[in-house]
Image (spheres, grey):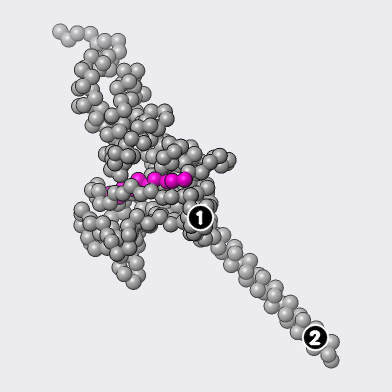
Amino acid sequence: MNPPPSAGGATAGFPSLHPEIIDSHILSRLDGPALASVACCSAALRRHSSEHSLWLSICHSTWPATASPHLSQLISTFPGGGPRAFFSHAFPLLSKLPLTHPPSSPTEILSAVDIHYDGKLIFTKLHSTDTSSDWFRCSPFRTDLIELKKAAPAAVKSSAGAGDGGMHEGVMTLSWIVIDPVGRRAANLSSHQPVSVRRHWLTGDLEVRFGSVLGGHVMCRIVVTCGGEMEVREVRMEMEDMDGRHLNGEESLVILQLALEAEKATGKNRAVEAWRRYIEFEDMKRERRERELRREGDWDILCLAILVSIYFFFWFYIF
């Protein structure tokens, strides 16, 4: 005869398991979103799911660029939970940028960048940008992660003839996390999946573009250029407005500050949401350009009419 079920249901016996079994054989197999969901089930699971080492391991497996000793130590000091707080900053898309600027701007920005293709890591780098120099503030903002004439060796081969220039849509994913090491803030500026894939008409290289719309009027554009066999030849980030103008360092730093302070979304359907924002931005950009062309055309017609009127008036006055 089976014993009657306990009042707590199936979860009533879960806390009786040895903590090492829960931590090492159950919770360690979950990813970040799943672990966050488990923490909502009970007080015991919330306690187990808040382990510092567990979330640090998830951060390292999700973003290998965070595994450096320096960044690991920095992540551990994030207010509100250390690596768990860092994950909540870096995993979801940005929701809404604040209207007021932070009182101080960071003098250094860290970029933790990871690129996967077919689930395999093909590029990872931790990059530091000095934002205090006059050169940075006055020059067009652009962050290049690969030096000229160098390339990162690929761990996989491209799928030739698969469409989109030889790459299946969505097989390449990218994460670009910007980190303020002083203010302990982080934000992911990538759309996670490509918003555009095309072949360069001259070199034949594959250009995979990721994008994040910031504040509705600025596009953070990330471009990954790959050669044969998915050899990563260029990884760069730049900012542009709706007129297609590239922002300089000072203007971009303001946008980055707002992104670091921005509210974060839930993380669900982040690739779809990023794609929707990108399409809206490109549509508004195209409409803005068409209005400008119409305005210029109307102005040209007006100027021509004035000149013709002056011409006829001149000859009417003469004769």
Q: Is residue 21 above or below residue 318?
A: above
Q: Is residue 151 magenta?
A: no
Q: Is residue 60 above or below residue 149?
A: above
Q: Amino acid at mark 2?
A: Phe
Residue plotted at (28% across, 51% down): 123
Q: Is residue 283 above or below residue 23?
A: below
Seen as rendered, the residue at the extreme front is: 133
Magenta part of the chain: 107-116
Residue placed under numbered mark 1 in the picture: 134
Residue plotted at (70% across, 75% down): 303
Pick whichever, 300 or 218, lies toward us.
218
Residue 72 visible somewhere in the drawing: yes
User: Residue 312: x, y in percent?
Assistant: 77, 85
> Element type at marker 1?
helix
Q: Quadrant of residue 112?
A: top left
Q: Main secondary structure of the magenta part?
A: strand
Residue placed under numbered mark 2 in the picture: 314
Q: Nearer the viewer, mark 1 or mark 2?
A: 1
